[in-house]
Image (cartoon, rainbow, N blue to C red):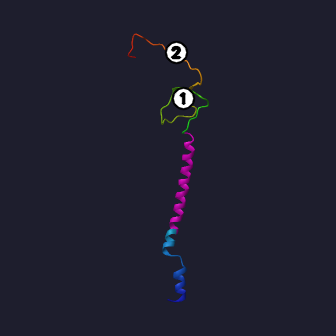
Amino acid sequence: MSTARWQKASFGPSRARRRAGSYYQPAQTQLRQAEATLKTATARLGYAEITAPRDGVLIARNVENGAVTPPRTVLLVLARAGQTQLFLEIDERSPNH
């Protein structure tokens, strides 16, 4: 093999290298899309946790697990922590209810 031919064969871009290069750009695009999806999912996760503004006793739940609600919807009602009184009227004539 001549020297010129050997250098071209040895140092020129191989077929495998050229083929691998053609996958690089689509892989970069997929990576950027995955990173954007992760960023969106992380932001949405912040909406998944509900924290109470104070200690208290839960007295009403206005939504079910998994419900999607508009902003400013009252989800839960808390009574202040401490002494809680409960007043009930019980009809003694109908014990099954």
Residue linked to disc 2: 87
Label 1 crowd bin: few (<14), some (14–19), many (20+), radius 10 Å: few
Q: Position of residue 6 (x, y in %)?
A: 52, 85
Q: Position of residue 47 (x, y in %)?
A: 56, 39
Residue closer to the observer: 51 or 30: 51
Q: What type is the residue that disc 1 sits on?
A: Leu
Which element is circle 2 on?
loop
Label 2 crowd bin: few (<14), some (14–19), many (20+), radius 10 Å: few
Residue at point 54% right, 88% down? 3
Q: Main secondary structure of the magenta part?
A: helix
Q: In this view, which residue lies farthest toward the right? A: 53
Residue 28 figure quarter: bottom right
Magenta stretch: give its range: 21-47
| Quarter occupied by the C terminus | top left
Residue linked to disc 1: 76
Q: Earlier in the sequence, mark 2 or mark 1?
A: 1
Query: Is mark 2 in CB contact (under 8 Å) with mark 1?
Result: no
Q: Is residue 55 magenta?
A: no
C-alpha gap between disc 2 and disc 1: 20 Å
Q: Nearer the viewer, mark 2 or mark 1?
A: 2
Residue at point 54% right, 29% down? 76
Which element is circle 1 on?
strand
Relative to 53, residue 27 above or below: below
Q: Is residue 26 magenta?
A: yes
